[in-house]
Image (tube, helix red, strand yellow):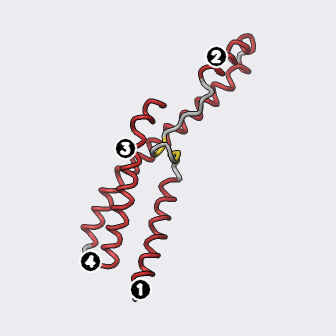
């Protein structure tokens, strides 16, 4: 996972950031400029699918790594005759916490989808408010 995060974290960041910009401007066009809802709906679906694929698969990999790490850490107490040797092996190999991130800035979790949508709604309300003040 470390190798994967080193080489794909920037790409995941670009995908998520550009999709958030795309969703914002599609919704902005729907609200303020046009009435073409069907075309915009398919545009939103086309943008949301890659973002959900990146976020959901990366968060599932992070969760699987955490679950495997917990299972490994409980292993020495389940096999008491090899406890000391297992603890030494686990300390030397498995103590680093690795997770998939967005450009090594933000750890990808499933809640990222909801926080990104909340941010889009908030900035949309701000833009609508600023657009009303003339």
**Residue lying at 24% horizontally and 67% vertically, measured from the top left:** 39
- Residue occupied by mark 4: 34
- Whole-angstrom CA distance, mark 2 to mark 1, is 63 Å
Cα distance in 3D space between marks 2 and 4: 62 Å
Q: Is residue 30 left or right of residue 95?
A: left
* 117 displayed left or right of 39: right
Q: What residue lies at 39% left-to-right and 38% top-to-bottom? A: 8
Res 54 → quadrant: top left
Q: Nearer the viewer, mark 3 or mark 2?
A: 3
Q: CA distance from mark 1 to mark 3?
A: 37 Å
- Mark 3 lies on a secondary structure that is helix
Q: Which residue is mark 2?
A: 89
The mark nearer the N terminus, 3 or 2, is 3
The reply, left or right, for residue 114 in relation to residue 127 is right
Classify residue 93 by image quadrant.
top right
Residue 57 position, x and y percent, is 44, 42
Q: Residue at x 51, y 59 (%)?
A: 115
According to the picture, the residue beneath numbered tag 1 turns out to be: 132
Q: Give the class, few, some or many, for how many residues have Cα within 10 Å of label 4's Cα (few <14, many ≥20).
A: few
Report, in whole angstroms, how far the alpha carbon at label 3 lies from the one at label 2: 34 Å
As helix, strand or loop, the secondary structure at mark 4 comes to: loop
Are circles 1 and 3 on residues that touch, CB within 8 Å?
A: no
- In the picture of the structure, the residue carrying the numbered disc 3 is 11
Q: Residues within 10 Å of mark 1 (few under 14, many from 20)?
A: few
Q: Position of residue 128 (x, y in %)?
A: 42, 79
Image quadrant where one finds the C terminus = bottom left
x and y percent of residue 77 in the render? 74, 21
Q: Residue at x 39, y 82 (%)?
A: 131
* Labelled pair 3, 2 in contact (Cβ < 8 Å): no
4 or 1: mark nearer the eye: 1
Q: Earlier in the sequence, mark 1 or mark 3?
A: 3
């Amino acid at each position: 996972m470390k190798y994967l995060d080193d080489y794909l974290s920037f790409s995941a960041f670009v995908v998520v950031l550009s999709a958030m910009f795309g969703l914002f401007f599609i919704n902005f066009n729907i609200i303020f400029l046009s009435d073409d809802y069907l075309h915009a709906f398919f545009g939103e679906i086309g943008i949301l699918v890659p973002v959900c694929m990146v976020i959901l698969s990366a968060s599932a990999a992070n969760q699987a790594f955490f679950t495997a790490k917990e299972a490994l850490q409980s292993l020495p107490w389940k096999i008491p005759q090899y406890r000391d040797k297992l603890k030494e092996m686990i300390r030397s190999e498995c103590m680093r916490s690795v997770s998939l991130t967005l450009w090594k800035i933000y750890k990808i979790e499933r809640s990222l989808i909801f926080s990104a949508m909340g941010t889009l709604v908030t900035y949309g309300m701000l833009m609508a408010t600023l657009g009303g003040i003339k």
